[in-house]
C-alpha cells in the first residue's frame, strides 16, 4: 500500500479521521440547538424577531460556532492527529475520550449560564468574568451554588447536553489491521495532519485567504440589524475565547488636532466666579437600580397609574435636582464605577480590566484631596471584590471599607457581601468620625441575583412581575434608614449627595427594553436645605457627568480631565454616550444615533418614538451629520488619550503632591 493510497483510504473510510469529523459535527449541532434554546428562554427580549430573521442570524452563527468548537477541541485534535501508532492504544483513546467530554461539557456550561444571565446584562459573557472573580474564588463557588438552585432547569439542560456528547462520541477507533511500515506511516500521517491543519486554521480564523483577518465579536455585526441580535449570532465560548487577550483600541484619525479640540475636548478649564465651597460629598452607587423602578421618574407609565417600588427614592426625587433622561455609560458593575468616580465610560472593554487599566487617572477623590478632603470607599463585598480597590487606590482614594472592616458575618448574605441596611448604617456611623470635608463613595450590593432579602423582611416588600423588585424595595428601605441616620449627624447639612446606579437589570415595560432604555438609571443631586432641586424634562445627564458636575458645583478652580460634562451648565451640548455590542450609541437633544464604522447609521427621535421603531438614518437630516461628527470626535479623543496615557491635566507643582498614604 502506497503513501497516497493510505491518505486516500484515511479520507474515505469510517476511520479515526472520519470519526473525529463526526464528533465535531455533533458538537456543532449541539451549539445550534442551544442557540435555539437561548432564544426560546429570552424571546421576550426579541418581540419583533421573525423566523426568517432568526434563520439568517443562526446561519451566520455557524461561522462563530465553527471557531468556538475548534478552539474548545484544539488540544484533542492535536493529540488525535499526531502520526504515531500509539494513538490507537486503548489507554490513550480513553484519555482522549475524557478530554473531549470535559472540554465540551465546560464550554456547554458557559452557554447555559449565559441563557440565565443574558436578561440582566444584554450581552454574551466575555473573559472579563474571570477578572471579576479572580481574587474571590470562594465567592465564585457560592455564586455557582445559587445558580444551580435558581436555574435548576438549565442545569438539567446542561446535563442532557453532556449525555448527548457522551452518546455521540461513539466507540473508540480500533487499530487498522494493515498499516504501512513506520517510516511511510509517519510521512502519510504528517501529510494528512497538514491537510487537516489547514482546515482547522481556516476555521479558527473564520475563512481562507491572506485577506481574511481573524474573526472577532465585531464580525457578528455582518449578520445583524440591531445590537441585541449579536447575542443570537455569537456563542458564549467564542465570546470568552476572543476576549482573553485584552484588545487594543484602534485610533481613527477623523480630524486633525486643531479641529478635534474645537469639536470636543475632555480637558476642562473652570473659571468659578465664587471661591471654592468645601462641602462634604457622598456618592451612592446603587446596584441594578434602573430608572424603571422609581415611580416619581415614571409618572406617565401604565396610563399614569404606575407607583414603582421605591417610596423613599420617590420622596428624595422631590427634593433633588434630576432629569427625565439620565443614563448609565456601561452595562455592568465593573464599568459603572469608573464612569461615576472618574468620568471614564465603557468603550470596548471595562477600563478596570482593559489594557489601559494602568493609565494614570485623576478621579473625583484625587481632585478633592488637593482641597484637603478625607476620601473613602465603602463596599460590603469581600475585600478586593471586582478589582475595585486596585482601581480606586490608583485613582486617589485613601481608604477602603469592606466586609473585613465591617467584621460581622452575622450580616453576611452568603454570596455577595453584607446586606445593604446594616452596611449603610455602618457607613453612616463611620463617616461621622471623619474630619470634614470628606468624600465618601459607597457601592451597594443586595439588589443582585439571587434576589434575596434578610429573613426578617421576607414578604414585606412588593414582589412585582420580576424577582428583583423585592430587593429594590429592601434597598430603598436601607437608603431611607441611611438618610435617617445621616440627617441626625452634624455633617449632614453641609453635604452634597449624589445617587445613581451602576447599571440596569432587565426591564418589564417596553420603553425600557430598547437599546436606549436599557441604559436609563437615576442620577440625583441632593443638598439638604438648598435650592438644588427640580425635574428637567429636556436635560440629558449621564454617569460620566457626575465628576465634572460635582467639581463645578463646589467651584473647583483647577483644570481637570473628564470625558463627561457639567450637567448643570446650559452653554454646552446636551448629550450622552454608550457602547452597545460592537457599535456606538450617541444621544443628543431629541435624537439617538447608532453608529458602527462601515455600516449605515441609524437615527431615531427617541422623545417622539420611545420604542425606536422609525429609523430616520439615511434621510440626510442635519442632526445625523452633526451627531456623527460629534461622536467621531469623542471616539477619537477617547482612543488617542487611552493609547497615549493622557487622562490627566498637568497641575501646579506647588500643590501636586498628595501625602496621605492609602490604606486598605
Image: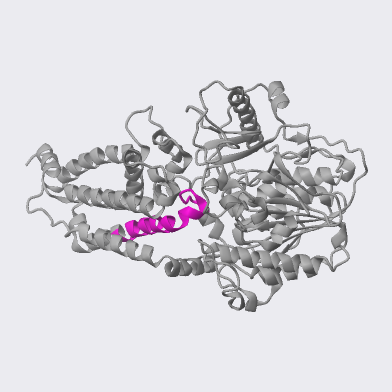
| Residue 382 in view | no
Compare residues 307 and 470 and report the one nearer the observer: 307
Question: Relative to 167, is 222 above or below?
Answer: above
Q: Quadrant of residue 629?
A: top right
Q: Determine whether, in the image, residue 381 is placed left or right of residue 154.
A: right
Tell whether position 337 is magenta: no
What is the chief secondary structure element of the magenta stretch?
Answer: helix
User: Could you tell me which residue is drawn at 7 percent across and 54 percent down?
Assistant: 177
Q: Quarter of the image containing the C terminus?
A: bottom right
User: Could you tell me which residue is drawn at 39 percent across and 45 percent down?
Assistant: 232
Q: Quarter of the image containing the N terminus?
A: top left
Q: Determine whether, in the image, residue 437 is placed left or right of residue 5.
A: right
Residue 119 picture location, percent across and down: 48, 54
Residue 421 picture location, percent across and down: 68, 70
Residue 74 picture location, percent across and down: 33, 49
Q: Determine whether, in the image, residue 237 is placed left or right of residue 244.
A: left
User: Could you tell me which residue is drawn at 34 percent across and 50 percent down?
Assistant: 35
The colour mode here is: one colour
Question: Relative to 335, is 381 above or below?
Answer: below
Compare residues 477 and 494 and report the one nearer the observer: 477
Q: Quadrant of residue 252?
A: top right
Question: Relative to 420, is 558 above or below?
Answer: above
Q: Determine whether, in the image, residue 54 is placed left or right of residue 273.
A: left
Residue 170 picture location, percent across and down: 18, 58
- The stretch of residues the image draws in magenta is 101-128
Tell whether position 113 is magenta: yes
Amino acid at each position: 500500500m502506497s503513501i497516497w493510497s493510505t491518505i486516500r483510504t484515511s479520507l474515505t473510510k469510517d476511520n479515526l479521521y472520519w470519526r473525529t469529523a463526526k464528533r465535531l459535527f455533533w458538537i456543532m449541532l449541539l451549539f445550534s440547538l442551544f442557540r435555539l434554546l437561548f432564544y426560546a428562554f429570552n424571546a421576550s427580549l426579541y418581540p419583533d424577531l421573525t423566523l426568517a430573521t432568526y434563520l439568517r442570524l443562526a446561519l451566520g452563527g455557524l461561522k462563530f460556532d465553527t471557531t468556538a468548537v475548534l478552539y474548545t477541541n484544539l488540544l484533542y485534535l492535536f493529540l488525535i492527529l499526531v502520526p504515531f501508532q500509539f494513538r490507537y492504544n486503548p489507554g490513550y483513546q480513553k484519555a482522549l475520550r475524557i478530554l473531549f467530554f470535559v472540554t465540551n461539557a465546560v464550554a456547554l456550561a458557559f452557554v447555559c449560564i449565559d441563557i440565565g444571565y443574558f436578561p440582566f446584562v444584554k450581552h454574551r459573557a466575555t473573559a472579563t468574568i474571570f477578572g471579576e472573580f479572580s481574587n474571590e474564588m470562594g465567592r465564585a463557588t457560592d455564586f455557582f451554588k445559587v445558580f444551580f438552585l435558581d436555574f435548576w432547569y438549565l442545569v438539567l439542560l446542561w446535563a442532557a447536553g453532556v449525555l448527548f456528547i457522551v452518546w455521540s462520541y461513539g466507540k473508540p477507533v480500533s487499530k487498522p489491521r494493515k498499516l504501512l511500515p513506520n517510516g511511510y506511516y509517519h510521512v502519510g500521517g504528517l501529510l494528512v495532519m497538514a491537510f487537516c491543519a489547514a482546515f482547522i486554521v481556516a476555521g479558527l480564523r473564520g475563512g481562507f485567504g491572506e485577506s481574511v483577518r481573524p474573526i472577532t465579536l465585531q464580525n457578528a455585526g455582518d449578520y445583524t440589524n440591531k445590537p441585541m441580535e449579536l447575542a443570537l449570532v455569537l456563542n458564549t465560548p467564542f465570546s470568552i475565547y476572543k476576549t482573553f487577550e485584552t484588545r487594543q483600541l484602534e485610533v481613527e484619525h477623523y480630524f486633525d488636532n486643531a479641529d478635534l479640540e474645537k469639536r470636543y475636548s475632555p480637558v476642562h478649564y473652570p473659571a468659578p466666579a465664587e471661591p471654592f465651597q468645601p462641602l462634604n460629598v457622598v456618592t451612592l452607587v446603587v446596584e441594578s437600580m434602573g430608572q424603571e423602578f422609581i415611580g416619581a421618574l415614571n409618572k406617565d407609565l401604565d396610563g399614569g397609574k404606575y407607583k414603582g417600588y421605591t417610596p423613599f427614592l420617590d420622596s428624595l426625587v422631590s427634593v433633588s435636582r434630576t432629569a427625565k433622561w439620565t443614563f448609565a455609560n456601561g452595562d455592568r458593575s465593573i464599568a459603572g464605577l469608573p464612569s461615576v468616580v472618574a468620568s471614564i465610560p465603557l468603550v470596548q472593554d471595562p477600563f478596570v480590566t482593559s489594557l489601559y487599566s494602568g493609565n494614570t487617572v485623576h478621579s473625583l477623590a484625587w481632585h478633592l484631596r488637593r482641597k484637603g478632603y478625607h476620601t473613602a470607599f465603602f463596599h460590603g463585598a469581600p475585600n478586593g471584590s471586582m478589582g475595585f480597590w486596585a482601581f480606586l487606590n490608583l485613582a486617589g482614594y485613601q481608604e477602603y471599607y469592606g466586609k473585613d472592616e465591617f467584621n460581622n458575618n452575622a450580616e453576611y448574605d452568603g454570596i455577595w457581601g453584607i446586606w445593604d441596611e446594616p452596611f449603610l448604617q455602618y457607613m453612616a456611623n463611620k463617616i461621622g468620625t471623619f474630619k470634614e470635608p470628606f468624600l465618601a463613595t459607597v457601592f451597594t450590593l443586595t439588589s443582585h441575583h439571587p434576589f434575596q432579602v434578610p429573613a426578617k423582611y421576607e414578604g414585606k416588600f412588593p414582589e412585582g412581575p420580576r424577582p428583583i423588585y423585592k430587593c429594590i424595595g429592601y434597598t430603598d428601605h436601607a437608603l431611607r434608614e441611611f438618610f435617617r441616620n445621616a440627617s441626625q449627624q452634624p455633617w449632614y447639612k453641609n453635604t452634597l449627595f449624589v445617587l445613581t446606579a451602576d447599571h440596569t437589570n432587565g426591564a418589564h415595560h417596553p420603553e425600557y427594553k430598547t437599546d436606549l432604555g436599557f441604559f436609563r438609571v437615576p442620577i440625583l443631586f441632593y443638598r439638604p436645605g438648598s435650592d438644588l432641586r427640580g425635574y428637567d424634562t429636556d436635560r440629558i445627564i449621564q454617569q460620566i457627568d457626575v465628576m465634572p458636575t460635582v467639581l463645578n458645583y463646589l467651584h473647583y478652580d483647577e483644570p481637570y480631565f473628564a470625558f463627561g460634562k457639567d450637567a448643570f451648565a446650559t452653554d454646552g451640548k446636551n448629550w450622552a454616550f454608550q457602547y452597545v455590542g460592537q457599535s456606538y450609541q450617541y444621544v443628543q437633544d431629541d435624537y439617538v444615533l447608532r453608529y458602527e464604522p462601515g455600516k449605515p447609521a441609524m437615527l431615531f427621535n427617541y422623545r417622539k418614538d420611545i420604542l425606536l421603531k422609525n429609523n430616520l438614518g439615511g434621510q440626510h437630516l442635519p442632526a445625523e451629520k452633526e451627531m456623527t461628527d460629534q461622536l467621531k470626535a469623542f471616539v477619537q479623543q477617547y482612543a488617542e488619550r487611552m493609547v497615549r496615557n493622557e487622562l490627566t491635566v498637568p497641575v501646579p507643582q506647588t500643590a501636586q503632591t498628595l501625602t496621605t498614604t492609602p490604606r486598605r
